[in-house]
Every structure is written in C-alpha cells, then in structure tokens.
C-alpha cells in the first residue's frame, strides 16, 4: 500500500494477495500451536508409561529377592532338622557317656557363615539395583519436566509472535487508512508544486509574447 501511494496511486483496501497471505499466516500459526500441543501430550504419555514400567520392574525385583530368601530359608530348615535328629540319636546312644560336644562344629559354623555372607551380598546387590532404578526414574522425571518446560516456553514464544503479527497487521491497516485519508486531502506540497508550474508557464508565455 505504501509503495502504491509513493508511486502516486491511490491508497485502497487490502488486495486479494495480502488477504490470502494473512489467512495463510494465521493457518500456519494455528498449525504450529497444534503441533506443540500434540508433542506435549505425547511427552506426558511417554513419561507416564516409562514411570509405570520402572515401577513394575522395581516391584518384580523386590518379589524376586523375597522369593530367593524364602527358598534359602526352606533349604536350610531340612538340614537343621536332620542335624537335630542325628544329635538326638547320638545322645540316646551315649546316655552313660559325658555330655555331648557342642551342636555345631567349626565346619558347620563356617558353612552357615558363608551362606549368611552370600545372602547378604545378594540382598546388597538387589538393593543397589533398586537404588539405581530409582535414580534412573528420578532422572527421567527431571528430563520430562525440563522438556515440558521448554515446550511450554516455545509455545509462549509462538503465541507472542502470533500476537505481534496481529498487532503488526492492525498497525499496517491503520497506516493504510491514514495514508488514504492523507492522499484525499490537498497537501501544501502539491499546491506549491502546481503554483510553481503555473508561474513558470506564465513567465515562458510572457517572454514569448513580449
């Protein structure tokens, strides 16, 4: 519109190309907002799914450790009962002898100590795995929060750009109207130009005649 006014043409309303370009820009902005909304929704779904999977994995590890502990206790009970039965038989066979030796020998004590250490090591490893899984879950949650914050910030920037484009369009339209009104009013520069041209023509004619 400004170019047409500078070229001497009359300032008119928006052309079809300008209206089409404005409609295309609005459609593009709406499409960008829909993409940002879709990405945020999918990110929330992925974070929820990841959290659920990590919780299920931790629960399975805990149940697995409990099952191993139950099997270890079950396997140690029969050996203890067998040992007690053998000890009772020995006591009944040696009633006239001196009191029997202590129930657990050094080899058996070492065996139980080794089993206890192995069990403690297993549970320590399981606990470390659970802690590692918890740390991973926390890191994933923090990354999810960061991504959501970044997407929200980008969405705000896009909305600000859309608002700025609307304001710019309004300002351009207002400027076109002002230019149109200014072109319709007789300006002093135009009057001076026509007066100068008339005076010069008068001088030329006067010189030719006289």
Image: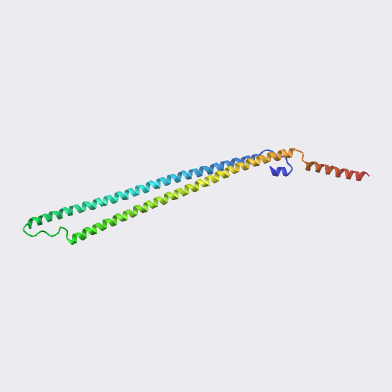
**In terms of image quadrants, where is residue 94?**
bottom left
Q: For this view, does 1 lie left or right of residue 90?
A: right
**What residue appears at the point 54 percent right and 41 percent down from the top-left corner?**
30
Q: Position of residue 164 (x, y in %)?
A: 59, 43
Residue reaching furthest to the right: 210
Can the viewer see residue 17 in this picture? no
Residue reaching furthest to the left: 96
**What residue appears at the point 22 percent right and 52 percent down from the top-left corner?**
73
Q: Position of residue 27 (x, y in %)?
A: 56, 41
Q: Position of residue 43 (x, y in %)?
A: 45, 46
Q: Position of residue 128 (x, y in %)?
A: 34, 55
In the image, 67 versus 94, the foreground residue is 94
Can the viewer see residue 116 in this picture? yes
Residue reaching furthest to the front: 99
In the image, 186 versus 36, the foreground residue is 186
In the image, 119 versus 201, the foreground residue is 119
**What residue appears at the point 20 percent right and 59 percent down from the top-left corner?**
109
């Amino acid at each position: 519109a400004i170019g047409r006014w500078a070229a001497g043409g009359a300032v008119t309303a928006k052309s079809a190309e300008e209206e089409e370009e404005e409609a295309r820009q609005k459609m593009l902005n709406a499409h960008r907002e829909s993409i940002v909304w879709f990405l945020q929704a999918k990110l929330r779904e992925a974070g929820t799914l990841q959290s659920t999977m990590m919780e299920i994995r931790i629960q399975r590890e805990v149940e697995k450790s409990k099952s191993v502990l139950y099997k270890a206790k079950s396997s140690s009970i029969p050996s203890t009962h067998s040992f007690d039965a053998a000890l009772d038989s020995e006591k009944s066979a040696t009633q006239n002898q001196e009191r029997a030796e202590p129930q657990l020998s050094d080899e058996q004590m070492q065996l139980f100590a080794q089993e206890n250490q192995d069990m403690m090591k297993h549970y320590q490893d399981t606990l470390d795995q659970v802690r590692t899984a918890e740390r991973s879950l926390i890191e994933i949650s923090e990354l999810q929060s960061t991504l959501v914050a970044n997407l929200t910030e980008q969405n705000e920037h896009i909305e600000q750009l859309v608002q700025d484009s609307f304001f710019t369009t309004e300002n351009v339209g207002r400027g076109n109207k002002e230019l149109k009104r200014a072109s319709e009013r007789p300006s002093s520069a135009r009057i001076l130009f026509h007066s100068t041209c008339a005076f010069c023509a008068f001088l030329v004619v006067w010189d030719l005649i006289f």
